[in-house]
Amino acid sequence: MAGVASRRAAEELIVAGEVKVNGNVVTDLATKVHTINDTVTVNGKRASVAYNLIYILLHKPKDYITTVRDEKGRRTVMQLVNVRERIYPVGRLDRNTSGVLLLTNDGDLANKLMHPSSEVIKSYHVTLDKSLDEAHAQKLVNGVYLEDGKTAPCELDIIPGTKAKNVVLHIHEGKNRQVRRMFESLGYEIEKLHRTEYAGLTLSGLGRGRWRFLNEKEVKGLRRVAGLLTN
Ligand code: URA
């Protein structure tokens, strides 16, 4: 892939002890090299592979889990996205939550987006088992007490014509199962949870289980949110 030799000739170079990984000679052809973290040299010269950074927006359906691999054999979001690059999800959505999920192999951007200091805005359409009381709505906006601390102030819109059973919650934190726990703390059950927005990205017509690459402008927007771009 680095354009040094054909696969066959590369194997000969390896067996002949001409190839080092992170400064150590390797002769085992099964040695795995990670293109981002490992340095490969051939006859003392660095062999570099152009590494393709990719950014994907997936409309996660219910009943898929947000993990790269599941030892119990359940369906994972990775099965919906067939690309050659080794990508992983940015944060997680519960098995029964649907909606916007980003996947990338850009570890730097992913870590920055997941870090609390980035305060990435996430919006969730919540369908409740009963109408949301006005006083409870105010409590959610001001912050509620969960076992791992009080939630930060957030925004809440009640969807007209739904008897306050459907609301949109905009939060910038990412505590585990945060939205479900916020409503449960006030005695509500969530019947349906759907993430409509992540850092300004929406599904806009992307069908359930479908995915697309982000365009350059969208990636730039994410880099800005993550504090990796200043202008
Ligand atoms: N909050 C939750 O409770 N579940 C999710 O999947 C995402 C946010």
Image (cartoon, rainbow, N blue to C red):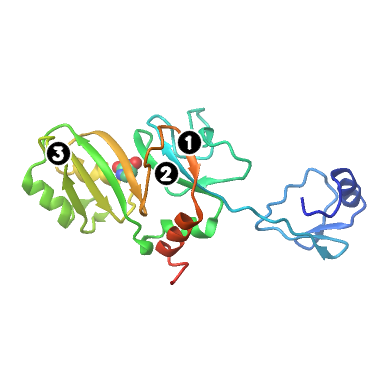
* Residue under numbered circle 2: 101
Cβ(mark 2) to ligand 1 < 8 Å? no
Quadrant in which ligand 1 is drawn: top left
Q: Is residue 29 visible?
A: yes
Q: Is residue 230 above or below residue 178?
A: below
Q: In the rendering, at what x and y percent does residue 140 appear?
A: 16, 51
What amino acid is found at the position of numbered circle 1 in the picture?
Val
Q: Are marks 1 and 2 in contact (CB under 8 Å)?
A: yes
* Residue under numbered circle 3: 187
| Residue 180 vs residue 90, the one in the foreground | 90
Q: CA distance from mark 3 to mark 1?
A: 31 Å
Q: Quadrant of residue 162?
A: top left
* Residue under numbered circle 1: 77
Q: Is residue 93 visible?
A: no
Q: Nearer the viewer, mark 3 or mark 2?
A: 2
What amino acid is found at the position of numbered circle 2 in the picture?
Leu
Q: Is residue 125 above or below residue 120?
A: above
Closer to the N terminus: mark 1 or mark 2? 1
What amino acid is found at the position of numbered circle 3 in the picture?
Gly
Mark 1 surroundings: few (<14), some (14-19) or many (≥20) residues within 10 A: many
Mark 3 surroundings: few (<14), some (14-19) or many (≥20) residues within 10 A: few
